[in-house]
Image: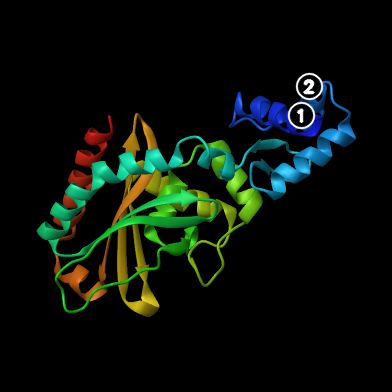
């Protein structure tokens, strides 16, 4: 057996045993009876490949996104898509606006399914956008646990003035995200494009796994019954949640 591969796998298994709790270099090395320098070199390679993530200087290590992609992530997305597609199609038929299902990956929100309305003027949004630049991304960020949110801010920092001008301090960000979390709703106005975005969470076994959004031109949003639109979005999310149980 190749020793360095064996040690790398030992490290991954130890981190994966409690994947959300950062483990220090010393704890990992001592648990596996490894030389600290050897352990640091292996971790450096695992971090570079995305299998392990370092939470700031001297704050420890957790599993990286690549490790999660090896644990059935594609199958998990398949379940999510199967639960969401029909309900999203019905929602778009009902409100005649574009809908989007998205997940959080690193500091980006990634669209995994879309439905399109039959409108002459439609809002288009990129498949991948920075978290702070969309209602869906902000909602997903708001629904993170306190520890995960702190790690996100340590790694990626605050939003730029261009992406979220109303939130330029940590206290303002926490205040905005706390409101979204309580209401389970994010509403974003993209002023320079005259676009509105609304997003609500999708749950699987009490864990937020995605966001469901509606995007539409601001002038149509202002003319609509906003409470009815949000209620339709929430009801669709509830049906998807029920399918994911």
**Measured from the top left, where is residue 166 in percent x and y?**
48, 65
**Residue 199, quarter of the rendered image:** bottom left
Give the quadrant of residue 128: bottom left
Give the SS element for disc 1: helix
The picture places residue 160, in percent across and down from the top left corner, at: 56, 67
Classify 25 as above or below 80.
above
Seen at 76% across and 39% down, the residue is 43
What is the C-alpha distance between the residues marked 2 and 1? 8 Å
Tell me whether the residue at label 2 lies in contact with that at label 1, contact meaning CB atoms closer than 8 angstroms.
Answer: yes
Quarter residue 117 falls in = bottom left
Locate residue 120 relative to residue 5 in the image: left or right.
Answer: left
Crowding at dot 2, Cα within 10 Å, few <14 / some 14-19 / many 20+, comes out as: some
Q: Quick one: 7 or 116, which is closer to the camera?
A: 7
Residue 208: where, in percent of width, then height? 39, 39
Q: Which residue is drawn at 71% across and 50% down?
A: 48
Residue nearest the observer in this picture, 174 or 32? 32
Q: Is residue 191 visible?
A: yes
Q: What element carries label 2?
A: loop
Q: Mark 1 points at which residue?
A: 7
Extreme residue in the left direction: 94
Q: Which of 174 and 112 is in front in this view?
A: 112
Residue displayed at 38% across by 48% down? 180
Instruction: Tell me, yes or no, if residue 177 can be seen here.
Output: no
Disc 2 target residue: 32
The dot on residue 83 is none
């Amino acid at each position: 057996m190749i020793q360095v591969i064996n040690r790398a796998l030992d490290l991954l298994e130890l981190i994966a045993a409690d994947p959300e709790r950062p483990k220090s270099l010393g704890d990992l090395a001592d648990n596996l009876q490894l030389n600290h320098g050897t352990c640091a070199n292996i971790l450096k390679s695992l971090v570079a490949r995305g299998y392990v993530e370092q939470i700031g200087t001297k704050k420890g290590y957790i599993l990286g996104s690549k490790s999660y992609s090896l644990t059935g992530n594609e199958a998990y997305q398949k379940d999510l898509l199967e639960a969401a597609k029909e309900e999203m199609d019905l929602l778009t038929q009902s409100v005649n606006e574009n809908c989007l299902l998205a997940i959080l990956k690193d500091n980006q929100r990634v669209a995994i399914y879309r439905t399109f309305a039959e409108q002459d003027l439609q809002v288009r949004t990129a498949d991948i956008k920075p978290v702070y630049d969309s209602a869906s991304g902000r909602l997903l960020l708001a629904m993170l646990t306190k520890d995960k949110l702190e790690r996100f801010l340590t790694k990626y920092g605050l939003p730029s003035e261009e992406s979220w001008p109303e939130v330029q301090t940590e206290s303002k960000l926490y205040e905005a995200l706390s409101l979204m979390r309580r209401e389970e709703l994010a509403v974003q106005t993209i002023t320079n494009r005259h676009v509105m975005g609304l997003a609500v969470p999708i749950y699987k076994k009490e864990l937020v796994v995605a966001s469901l959004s509606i995007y539409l031109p601001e002038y149509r949003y202002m003319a609509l019954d906003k409470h009815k639109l949000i209620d339709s979005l929430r009801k669709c999310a509830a049906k998807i949640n029920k399918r994911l149980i």
